[in-house]
Image: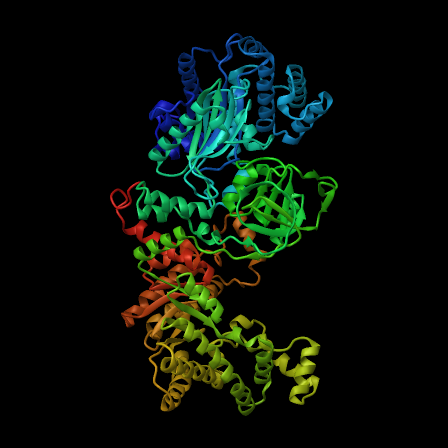
Amino acid sequence: MTKYVYSFEEGSADMKDLLGGKGSNLAEMTTIGLNVPPGYTVTTEACLEYLDEGKLTEEIKEQMKKKMEKLEEKMDQKFGDPEDPLLVSVRSGAAVSMPGMMDTILNLGLNDETLQGLVEKTDERFAYDSYRRFVNMFGEVVRGIPHREFEEIMDGVKEKRGADQDVDLDAEGMKEVTEGYKELVGDIPSDPWEQLMEATKAVFGSWDNERARRYRDLNDLPHDMGTAVNVQTMVYGNTGKNSGSGVAFTRDPSTGKNKIYGEFLRNAQGEDVVAGIRTPLQISDLKEMWPDIYEELEEVCQTLEEEYKDMQDLEFTVEDKELYILQTRTGKRTPNAAVKIAHDMHEEGIISKEVALLRVEGDQVEKILHKRIDPEAELDKLTQGLNASPGAASGKVVFDTDEAEKRGNDDESVILVRPETTPEDIHGLAAAQGVLTSRGGMTSHAAVVARGMGKPCVAGAEDIDIDLEKEYFEVDGKKIGKEDIITIDGTTGDVIVGEAPLIEPEFTDEFEKLLGWADDIRKMGVWANADTPKDTEKAIEFGAEGVGLCRTEHMFFEPERLDVMQEMIIAEDEEQRQKALDQLLPMQKKDFKELFEVMEGKTLTIRLLDPPLHEFAPTDKESQKDLAKRLDLSIEEIQRKVDRLEEANPMLGHRGCRLGITYPEIYKMQVQAILEAASEVQEEVAEVEPHIMVPLIGNVKELKNVKEKVVEPVQEKVFEEKEEVDFEVGTMIEIPRAAIRADEIAKEADFFSFGTNDLTQMGFGFSRDDVGTFVPNYLDEGIMDKDPFQVLDQDGIGELVKMGTERGRETKQDLSVGICGEHGGEPSSVKFCYRSDLDYVSCSPYRVPVARIAAAQVVIEDEKDVDEGVEGY
């Protein structure tokens, strides 16, 4: 018989897949002696069975009944007893943390009869406050009634009775709210067991609701895990001034500092804190208010870090000055905090270097370079809220989350402004540059989600009066409307009128040290794609060991050079082309000298001209007239020449090595510029290591032709007059045929570099420029798991990479092989490259740190002993 239900005493932290993160942690905390309200967990297997069968089986129900009987014995109360009712919470809990994405019902077991028993045991106001919360949550979770409809009833009663906040309502006020809620919801089962069954089914069903699926999509989580249901004895933070609820992090989730961080509300249940209904107190205020409770909470935090060896995010309730721990989970943190916590925990002897590196995710590394407002700038500061998620962003004000999603996805910078956010707003948060709320605190939904996404958030800006209907907000008489531009600073909490100047951040000492640890462990090189001295300097600053791709075509788009380039491509014969190329030669040579000087002996891989010539042609009438005048030709002649350059499918047309074979003088000019620049820099400044990369080779004879008719004669000519330089000639493997025939191509190539952007394009038969019209649908339909232009398709394109590498090295054992598509900075693709025996990855400068960390992580994952070499993992 399958066991579907476990009491907290029966579980443990390593049962996460079965009990969910919440259930396994409640079990673990119970085992180590923390004050956890007792309860039981219905497993993820039961959830999956329910979703498959469409009903709770009798076996699941029977096991739940038996556990409820045990709970009644433990608490000396009866579920549904009208005199002394046992009340429970019902909460979801998947194997991975999904804060705010799933559903909760509190105070389950209340009905009109058990309410009277609660009144007799406590007081009328508390009882009705608990009852209205149950009706509200049952209505939302089980009946699907929008939260705003309950808010409208609450706001109406508060206005009628002159109450500013929920806590200002007396017993009669709470009774009126409860009756309004009951009328809205309609029939609620009076039998607590039926309530529990409906709640369990609703929580299981919440695994498949839209916001949960969207959250999993955004966070790359599987859809087939299911959620557990946790049934737990209620404790109350809303019994009066000696009670309250809070959320605490064992370290600051924004900065990573080793101090307790969080918020607390007196006379409130836990959902009040995260919902942002009232602006809470800081956790440090507990030290003054209830010093004994604060000291106990410090001990709990220390115990949890020792147990889990990571920063924890815990929920707690104080009932009549007794502390209860309701939940713990690994705390979400900003990218900067992730680095500091990983570093500090190693320095404190809690985890190893290897674990520290595994704790920092690739997307966190990529986001770590948050922009900030220029400290010298003069700012029109509007107001200040809570600095809920660091970084700064500017954009047009948008109040509607659907509009924020649409405009953000259209590459428009918008700031989402809301009274508070809910899980239904996640799509707008994901697309906006940042979020500003007038209510809520540091652990509100907006704050937690923004931190997880690495977006700036200013929360709880209470001076802001928002009118969602008229789409403006007001601060001290100043109106800011939709379309107005504001800047938010999530590091300080400032809200600024207009677009403030932003500057790039610098590495922290902890981040530098973490990257150093990564470099000590990784075995694969990390290079950069860089076309200018500025980009190259930035790449080296970020730790690049070479340049794996320098695109020469980008050097021709400056106005002065573009004029000469256009003259060259319009030329009727080789003599005219050569005249233009003679003008381009010193420009190219200057470019390459500057790059070699920056590289200081590191490898510089220069790709010869790759795009089709029509990309340089003048397309508008004015540019064509100007070119005609310069060349003393008619506009009609220019138009005819431009038309001749057009191709039906230019990405598969006259480009790459095909240009160099048809017009060898173009490649000769480039090779001459490279070798002369390298020779002069070697003689005057520093060592050089030039690699000349011939693009779009599909046939070994193409590479042989370019070498014999371009490289070798130019080499001979240049080195007759200048100091010789060692250099290599290789190719990009970007045509599937090249991967298949890599053994032949390796006879002529000194190195391979996989151009996975084009290899993906040609391997799938997808146009990079048009995939946006159908790939999103493919992802929604499950035809693809990832966009193959963002994450390397390891099963298909990856097989071509492995085949090309293996076959190339069959011919030339010491063949250097790398990758220079943007996949070279995507963590899972970097790991694939290591496992495919590549020598290096090359990516954009700002992704170099990502690749350095990922290249170390794959060594740890594949080669380290988890039990011994990665203590604490």
Q: What is the quadrant of the N terminus in the image?
A: top left
Query: Where 107 falls versus 739 (above or below)?
Result: above
From the top left corner, tell me how far across and down residue 668 is, in percent: 45, 85
Image quadrant containing the C terminus: top left
Q: Position of residue 344 (x, y in %)?
A: 36, 44
Examine the rendered structure and indicate whether residue 416 appears above or below residue 543: above
Residue closest to the eye, 782 or 600: 600
Residue extending farthest to the left is: 868
Above or below for 615 versus 843? below
How far from the left and from the top, in percent, is residue 541?
A: 42, 63
Q: Is residue 829 left or right of residue 375?
A: left
Q: Nearer the viewer, residue 789 or 134?
A: 134
The tally of labels here is: 0
Image position of 236 (left or right of 398) = left
Query: Looking at the rendering, which quadrant does residue 297 occupy?
Result: top left
Q: How is the image coloured?
A: rainbow
Task: Identify the image quadrant of residue 692.
Answer: bottom left
For the question of whether residue 146 can be seen, the reply is no
Q: How far from the left and from the top, in percent, is residue 659? A: 50, 80
Point 66% across, 38% down: residue: 463
User: Which quarter of the figure has residue 267?
Assistant: top right
Can residue 192 be seen at all in this image of the molecule?
A: yes
